[in-house]
Image (cartoon, helix red, strand yellow):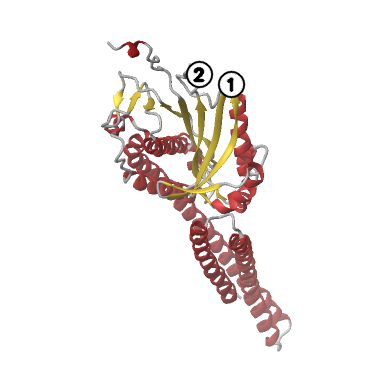
């Protein structure tokens, strides 16, 4: 043994840095530019970045010292699919300190920063009250969030749990995730070598997939828990919410099945992943929910048939009353003819009036009622589309004049907005044409 080896510094058995990742959802879809408009006032201008091919916004939520000695930085990344994740970086280079579980939810400075972020994104000091406030959907759309509803209730917030990545220390008893033995997993915690940014980026990508899968799986379970309430509800919007939710999860599964990491050997962790659990449960769960909604549709059809039977019975009663009225009219005017002979026109006019007048009055009332109802419905739809057009036009104008957005992203967002504008214009024209035809 050389003399210099005796004085070699002892290898550090604690990480130099710890990264904690937690996933959240704001809705089924997000307009990143509109969201950045009011989030920038609270957290400054974001960085526009691509993450695994997705357009994203990166915000610094907070930074400082934990316990007045450990530097930290808390960031949030937003995606257009309505989700995102927060990342906590703890710098332990100057400390003999380690963590066995995340501290995002156990430190006041972190939880308060996350609360401020959610409140700023939703533009409210009480996010939970949004779930029960009328007109919430349109308010969120004007903020750039397409609401997600689970069994009729707004769904947003952070997924349970988080993932830990420790950097700078590789335990010898962990399961290897990389051929070069620079990434392992032990007790659900990832360990990678210092300075390995590419592997950390891949782990970020994998952690987001797992967190989002956990969120979708949790939402599916909420659908199942509240299924009896959904079945008994007469709201016609619930099947539409359910269909949008299924489309969202289907798109997510199809996208994430294409995920393949050339840096990580994930065969050791895939069997226990939330994504595999979601994919295996989704087909059977969605089939079960579809069957339940099919049964609900059958109930709606049954109720409709009952209503038609009642309407038919009412029409039969009206017809019988009309026949009785005609008979009484004939009897009365026959007696009148006997009393006042030589005036047949009086009998003819009176009988005709009693026969035609009830039918004419009923037809006028029915057509007027139907016209007012249809006109009111068309007007509501026209106002909704017009409001969306105004919001989109203003957003389009702001985006064209905004130099803070990189040119590459701005062109993509402008193209997307123009397509949406054309779609809204065609819908608005169709509504106007339908209104003119009805008049």
Within-10-Å neighbours for mark 1: few <14, some 14–19, many 20+:
few
Residue 69: mark in rendering: 1
Q: Which residue is mark 2?
A: 95
Look at the numbered disc 2 and give the secondary structure of its residue: loop
User: Distance between the Cα atoms at labels 2 and 1?
Assistant: 9 Å
Q: Nearer the viewer, residue 177 or 335?
A: 177
Q: In the picture provided, is 229 more to the left or to the right than 325?
A: left
Within-10-Å neighbours for mark 2: few <14, some 14–19, many 20+:
few
x%, y% of residue 69? 58, 21
x%, y% of residue 67? 60, 20
Q: Earlier in the sequence, mark 2 or mark 1?
A: 1
Query: Is residue 279 shown above or below 269?
Result: below
Residue 40: mark in rendering: none
Q: Are marks 2 and 1 in contact (CB under 8 Å)?
A: yes
Look at the numbered disc 1 and give the secondary structure of its residue: loop
Q: In the picture provided, is 357 more to the left or to the right than 408?
A: right
Query: Is residue 129 shown above or below 356?
Result: above
x%, y% of residue 175? 29, 24
x%, y% of residue 197? 40, 36
**Outermost residue, bottom direction?**
342
Query: Is residue 187 shown above or below 426?
Result: above
């Amino acid at each position: 043994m050389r003399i210099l080896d005796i004085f070699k510094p002892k290898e550090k058995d604690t990480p130099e840095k710890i990264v904690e990742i937690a996933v959240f959802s704001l809705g089924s879809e997000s307009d990143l530019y509109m969201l950045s408009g009011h989030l920038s006032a609270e957290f400054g201008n974001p960085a526009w970045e691509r993450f695994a091919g997705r357009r994203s916004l990166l915000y610094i939520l907070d930074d400082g010292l934990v316990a007045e000695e450990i530097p930290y930085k808390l960031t949030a990344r937003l995606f257009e699919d309505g989700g995102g994740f927060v990342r906590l970086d703890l710098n332990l280079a100057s400390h003999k300190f380690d963590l066995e579980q995340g501290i995002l939810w156990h430190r006041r400075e972190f939880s308060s920063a996350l609360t401020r972020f959610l409140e700023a994104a939703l533009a409210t000091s009480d996010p939970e009250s949004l779930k029960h406030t009328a007109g919430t959907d349109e308010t969120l759309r004007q903020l750039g969030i397409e609401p997600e509803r689970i069994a009729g209730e707004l769904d947003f917030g952070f997924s349970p749990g988080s993932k830990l990545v420790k950097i700078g220390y590789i335990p010898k008893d962990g399961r290897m995730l990389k051929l070069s033995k620079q990434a392992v997993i032990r007790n659900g915690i990832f360990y990678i070598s210092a300075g390995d940014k590419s592997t950390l980026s891949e782990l970020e990508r994998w952690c987001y997939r797992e967190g989002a899968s956990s969120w979708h799986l949790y939402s599916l379970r909420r659908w199942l828990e509240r299924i009896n309430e959904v079945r008994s509800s007469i709201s016609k919007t619930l099947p539409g919410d359910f269909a949008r939710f299924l489309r969202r999860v289907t798109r997510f599964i199809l996208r994430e099945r294409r995920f393949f990491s050339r840096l990580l050997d994930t065969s050791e962790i895939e069997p226990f992943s939330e994504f595999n659990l979601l994919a295996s449960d989704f087909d059977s769960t969605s089939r079960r929910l579809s069957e339940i909604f099919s049964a609900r549709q059958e109930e709606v059809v049954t109720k409709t048939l009952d209503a038609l039977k009642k309407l038919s019975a009412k029409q039969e009663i009206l017809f019988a009353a009309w026949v009785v009225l005609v008979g009484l009219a004939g009897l009365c005017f026959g007696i009148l003819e006997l009393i006042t002979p030589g005036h047949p026109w009086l009998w003819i006019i009176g009988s005709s009036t009693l026969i035609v007048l009830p039918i004419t009055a009923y037809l006028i009332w029915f057509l007027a009622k139907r016209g007012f109802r249809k006109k009111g419905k068309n007007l509501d739809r026209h106002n909704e589309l017009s409001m969306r057009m105004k919001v989109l036009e203003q957003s389009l104008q702001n985006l064209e004049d905004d130099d803070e957005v990189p040119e590459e992203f701005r062109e993509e967002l402008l193209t997307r907005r123009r397509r949406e504008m054309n779609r809204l214009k065609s819908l608005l024209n169709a509504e106007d044409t339908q209104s003119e035809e009805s008049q």
